[in-house]
Amino acid sequence: MAKKVELIEEDQQLENRVYELGFHFVSTIVEDEVAVQFSHLKSLIEKRGGQFIAEEMPKFKNLAYPISKTVKADRKNYLTSYFGWVKFEINPEEIVPLEKEIKAFGPMLRFLLIKTVKENTFLGAVAEIKADSSSKIVKIADEPVEDITTEDDATEVPAEDAVADVVSSDDAVSEIVDTEKVADIATE
């Protein structure tokens, strides 16, 4: 019986998991150097046995708030950065040492390393969620709109964005609804 337990534990240790690393590089890097630094970051993952699933080259972005970084007793505030991400598969035992290497990586301003799934999880501007147990699908728009529900069709939806369209699950999912058109329909 002890051999079975050992074999199961070995199998579980060998199973790779999917992770996503979202990161900001400091904006003081020369734009031509960003690709080189991104390649170096990917090589840190690769040398630990990581296999890449998807990635996005870092792009220059304005930050929502200043982020400070201290290097050798010199503190700098950044209002811009290069944001990128990479999704990869790796042995979970390699994550802690990898995280330490990423933290020590020179151009890194801030990063987030999460466990995720292999499938493409990017939802874009519209997300579909189950509204309630009556099998209605609710589309969520990027911009809030006025409350357009009536007492007959009111459904509570726990979301930060406004409800733009409600369709039954039997219907084919309609095209993305323009929030201004929805607001105009609601005022009629």
Image (spheres, grey):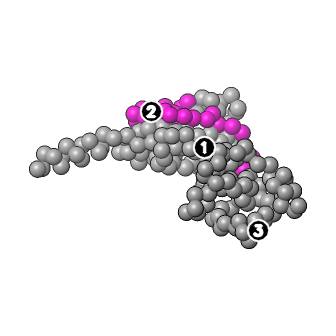
Residue 52 image offset from top left, x and y in percent: 49, 33
Query: Which mark sits nearer the N-terminus, 2 or 1?
Result: 2
Which amino acid is tagged 1? Answer: Phe
Residue at x-position 58% and y-position 57%: 135
Query: Which mark sits nearer the N-terminus, 1 or 3?
Result: 1
Identify whether 22 is placed above or below 160. above
- Between 63 and 106, the one nearer to me in the picture: 63
Identify whether 105 is placed above or below 51. below
Residue at x-position 73% and y-position 60%: 162
Residue 143 image offset from top left, x and y in percent: 77, 55
Query: Which mark sits nearer the N-terminus, 2 or 3?
Result: 2
| Foreground disc of the pair 1, 3 | 3
- Between 19 and 166, the one nearer to me in the picture: 166
Quadrant assignment for the C terminus: bottom right
Per the model, the C-alpha gap separating discs 2 and 1 is 20 Å
Residue 24 shows in the view: no
Residue 150 tag number: 3
Mark 2 highlights which residue?
A: 51
1 and 3 marks in contact (CB < 8 Å): no
Q: Residue furthest left?
A: 1
Which amino acid is tagged 3? Answer: Thr
| Foreground disc of the pair 2, 1 | 1
Q: What is the crowding at mark 1: few (fewer than 14 residues within 10 Å), some, or many (at least 20)? A: few
Residue 101 image offset from top left, x and y in percent: 47, 42
- Between 92 and 160, the one nearer to me in the picture: 160
